[in-house]
Every structure is written in structure tokens, then in C-alpha cells.
Image (cartoon, rainbow, N blue to C red):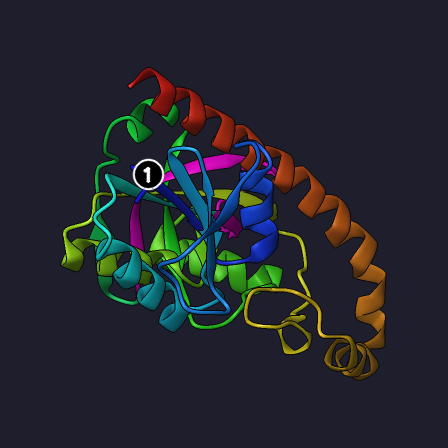
Amino acid sequence: MARFVLLAPLKAEADALASALGPGEAAGALAPPAALRRHGGVLCGWCGMGRAPAEAAVAAIAKTRPAALLFAGVAGALAPGLRCGDVVWLESALAGEEEERWEAPAPLAAASSDWPRGSVLTVEALVGAPAQKRLLGESFAADLVDMETFWAARAARRAGLPFAAVRVVLDERDEELPDFSAGLDPVGRPRLLAFGRRLLRGPRDVLALPRLARSFGVAERSLCAVARAVRAAIAES
């Protein structure tokens, strides 16, 4: 097993991370639709959206005893000053009244030195309405919102796996993000017929697709920067 594992919920997020790591080859350890690829001394892959896939993937990875796991991906902003593409290295995750805290292990701590720290609120379903994001940010004093980090962190702690997490802002606090999840597969890829049906139910959401594509492109570049920093820190360790 490689010394370090980079894991994202979505395949597109994992692809962005992997693009900064060089050529890779398939590796085992995870059950489909989750997957890992080996890039030298680093494994990089995806687990799928939500609690159960994150917990299952982290538990499986922990059994292989890597040096550390970095959980990474995009998230929505709850704090007003965060902009699309901003990188936030997380120190804690909330789920309701529960909290997980951690300290990034070396060399992941070194890789994070150029970016701010923050916290994430993990919820069960996508939060895309600006009013809801403002309310959650005020209620929980969290910087970001996602659907996985708390569960990944808890699974890692219970398994004794050193853990770190980083998120990149996709949608800003005052920006509407339509929920297209009904048209996606478990790792975030569009399912043609299901995606078409989703657009028929909300045809005005089609107008958001170009903006969402541009925002994801910005976030992808930030994920690449994170992976480059991690690769450099690992090489120096």
C-alpha cells in the first residue's frame, strides 16, 4: 500500500487531484463504484457521495495501514468572504451537535501551510439556496458545507488512521446551486436519461449549467494546486 491516500467523493474531484500526480495505474482496496489508482507512493481515488460511501471507503483504506489519508473535494461556502476556488484546510467537522477534530499529520500539515484553516458542516442533502446557507453558517459557525467529511473523519478516528481534510469552494454563500443529484450516478457522473428527466422537472436550471461548469473549472485548478503541494511535501519528507 502507498504511504498516503488522497480520497474524494466525486470522480471528477479525484481526476483533478490525480492530474497533478502523474500517470497512475489501477489499485485495489475499494469496492465499485469507488476506486483507487496508484501514482507512485500515493493512491488517489473516489468513494461516492454521502455518508455510507465515505465510511465504507475509509474503513477499507484503514485496513491497508497507509501513513495517512487526505479527504478532499469541493464544498459550498457558508462564510461570506469565501470565493469560488478558495482552498480551506479543515480542522473540524460538525454533524448536528456532534463534532470531529483532528490535526493534520506530517507531511500533510506542511502541504497545508499556504492556505487558511476552517470548519465544515456535514449534512445529509445538498444545500444550494443562499438563504439556507446563510442560516446554517450563522447557526453552526461553520465555514463550509458538504455531505461527507464528518463521517470520513469519524471513520478514520475509529480505525486509528491519521487524517486530514481539505475543501475547495464551488458555490459561494450568496450563489444559488441547483440540486442535480437525481440525475447523477453515485460518484457524480451524469446519467443521460435521469439527468434529462431532472432538467425537464426544472427547465430553468439549465441556465445554471454554464456557470456551474465554469465554477467547477476554477475549483479543479485549486484541487490540482493542493495535490501539487501534497506531492512536494511528501517528496521532501
Q: Residue 128: x percent and y percent?
A: 60, 63
Q: Is residue 111 above or below residue 40?
A: above
In the rendered view, does 65 fall on the left or right side of 24?
A: left
Q: Is residue 120 above or below residue 103?
A: below
Q: Is residue 26 something that shows in the picture?
A: yes
All told, the count of numbered labels is 1
Q: Residue 72: x percent and y percent?
A: 44, 46
How many neighbours does mark 1 have within 10 angstroms: few (below 14), some (14-19), or many (20 or more)? many
Q: Quadrant of residue 22?
A: top right
**In the depicted view, which residue is nearer to us: 38 or 137?**
38
Secondary element under disc 1, as helix, strand or loop, is strand
Q: Is residue 219 above or below residue 51?
A: above
Is residue 114 shown in magenta? Answer: no
- Identify the residue shown where x is 58% and y is 62%: 131
Task: Name the amino acid, label 1.
Answer: Phe
**In the depicted view, which residue is nearer to us: 179 or 189?**
189
Is residue 81 shown in magenta? Answer: yes
Q: Quadrant of residue 91?
A: top left
> Which quarter of the rendering shows the C terminus?
top left
> Which quarter of the rendering shows the N terminus?
top left
Q: Residue 191: x percent and y percent?
A: 71, 74
- Identify the residue shown where x is 24% and y is 61%: 155
Q: Residue 129: x percent and y percent?
A: 61, 64
- Identify the residue shown where x is 85% and y is 75%: 203
Q: Which residues are magenta?
A: 73-95
Q: What is the chief secondary structure element of the magenta stretch?
A: strand
Q: Is residue 109 above or below residue 143?
A: above
- Identify the residue shown where x is 49% and y is 72%: 125
| Residue under label 1 | 4
Q: Is residue 173 something that shows in the picture?
A: no
